[in-house]
Image (cartoon, rainbow, N blue to C red):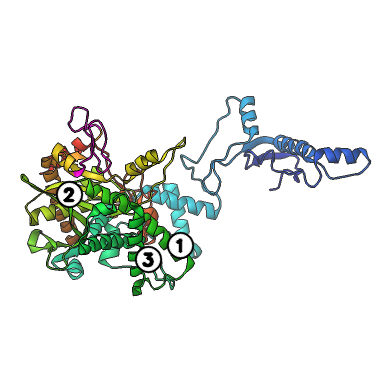
Amino acid sequence: MGDVDRSRSHKVKSVYIIGLNDGVYPNVNRSEGFFGDEEREYLKEQGMELAKGTLENLYDDNFNIYKAFTTAENKIHLSYCSADAEGKTLRPSIYISKIKKMFPKLQEKSDVINSIYEITNKKATYEALIEKIAQAKGEKIELTWKEVYNYYINQLEWKEKLEQDIKGIEYTNLPQNINRETIQRLYGNTIKTSISKLEKYKSCPFSYFLQYGLKLRPKEELKIQSFDTGSFMHEVIDMFFTQIREKNEGLTIYLDDEKKIQKEVKNIVETKLDYEKYRFMATVKCKILVKRLVKVVSKALKYIIESLVYSSFEIQGSEIEFGKGKEHKPIILDLENGNKVEIQGKIDRMDIAKTEDGNYIRIIDYKSSAKDIDLNKVYAGLQIQLITYLDSICEEQDVIPAGAMYFSLLEPMVKANRKLNKEEIDEKLRDNYRMKGLILADINVIKMQDNTIEEGKKSNIIPAKIGTNGQIDFRSTRSGITSEQFEILQKYIAKLIKQIGQEILQGKIDLKPTNYKGQKPCEYCEYHSICGFDVRNNQNKYQYIEKLSKDDIIKKITDSF
């Protein structure tokens, strides 16, 4: 065994040349060194003897490879790698292509797709044996490999290792259902939970069990954690409207007065930072963060105020909690065998519009990121929060659902390939601050939610558009659903929550993470090291969500009743 640069073998029956990859044979990675080839040639002409340059080394490489190829008297075996240690594809050497042209009938073999198992040395044969046993999956293996097994099991140095490896082959990371006694001790007869936790269960039942059943937590680190900016912004907005109600001020005085809004927001933020839980806000980094938060919240409030001033809806409540206080009881659903699901939660904002035909209600959830309601996720149980809250309010009060929407607090970045004037920038900003979600597809209710909407144009406030004929443009208003469809969704969510609760109390902790549009929850899961989910394991599979149209989803839900 040797390197082609140093080996000088003669009268060899068989030669094996390995690693015939592009960049290795011939080597193209050699640098010229301190002197370039032209400089070396000049110095050589001046009578100075130097080491060989890149061109001479290339000639030597070609000669050495030629010698290696022509040394064998009977057989020559050539091989190259298809990938490196990291799995990156490697190309064969140009010599492989030349050999194939010289010998068109030459047959190339590979053990990448179909592994070739041979009995060679002890270590390689042992690894081949383990792979053969794993592939057999409990069935009988060939007589030859059975004899190989008997050889290793009777060797003291291999016996223990072989037994352990066979146990490893039989191991599965799929969890077994939890018995009834353990589930009773964990949850009792009533699961006290939240919508986000139920969504977590649908995302991955095993992850839910680890987090909320066993209550496993990552190891705590001794460091000052930054405060939750999303919750902080929600609290500031809530206090802003609370102060307006206490002062008995109208929202119109803040319309188009960003400085007044920013002043109020700044005062609220400074007041909140005096509280004990924000004591660690003295660092320069946090001060800059707070300054930015004041700017972001003030900008968002400008468009929230516009959405209220230019609509017939008024804020009925904010930061409304279910299960805390006397105002709203927890959402309780009865299951089989006297079991129950008790849901607690919070609504960021609830608006109401009173008409002669009835009172309309809409749920608004503030998000520090761009978010929309995806009915495919709703059907899969991954996005059921707003509809659950809406259904609960409709049961408590005699109201009609008008919408369930998200309002993004994220400051948008306006991009354009030309210079924009102030009006055009404002228009793009309004487009980004437009609420997203589901709305009642009723022309009168849409106009109630946006008094400024014009025919042939989209609303700046809600996800709706009125056509030139004065009716709803359903091609552009994909968020619009009828009152019957709202009712179907509400019934389905209630049924889905009962189903989730029943599965939890039955001890089902399947290892089935949900994969939707290529979004894999395992990438950021804190419990991945425990479950060891790996798609390369035939037993580990994602639960894929089929992407359907709105009409198909409504039909599937209707057929499920």
Q: At 49% across and 45% down in the image, what residue appears? A: 117
Q: Is residue 328 above or below residue 385?
A: below
Kindly give the residue lying farthest to the front in the view shown.
253
Percent x, y of residue 124: 53, 52
Percent x, y of residue 300: 33, 52
Left or right, residue 190 beside residue 270: left
Left or right, residue 182 beside residue 271: left
Q: Amino acid at mark 2?
A: Phe
Tell which tag, 3 or 1, sits nearer the viewer: 1
Kindly give the residue lying farthest to the right in the view shown.
47
Asked if the residue under mark 1 is in contact with the one under mark 3, i.e. CB atoms within 8 Å, the reply is: no
Neighbour tally class for label 1: few under 14, some 14-19, many 20 plus, Cα within 10 Å: few
Neighbour tally class for label 2: few under 14, some 14-19, many 20 plus, Cα within 10 Å: many
Magenta stretch: includes residue 172:
no
Q: Amino acid at mark 1?
A: Ile
Percent x, y of residue 427: 35, 40
Question: Who comes first in sequence, dot 2 or dot 3?
Answer: 3
* Element type where label 1 sits in the image: helix
* Structural distance between the alpha carbons of marks 2 and 1: 36 Å
Q: Which residue is mark 2?
A: 313
* Element type where label 3 sits in the image: loop
Q: At 26% across and 54% down in the image, what residue appears? A: 253
Magenta stretch: includes residue 464:
yes
* Element type where label 2 sits in the image: loop
Q: Quadrant of residue 32?
A: top right
Q: Which residue is mark 1?
A: 288
Nearer the observer, 290 or 401? 290
Q: At 14% across and 55% down in the image, what residue appears? A: 498
Say the numbered circle drawn on residue 194.
none
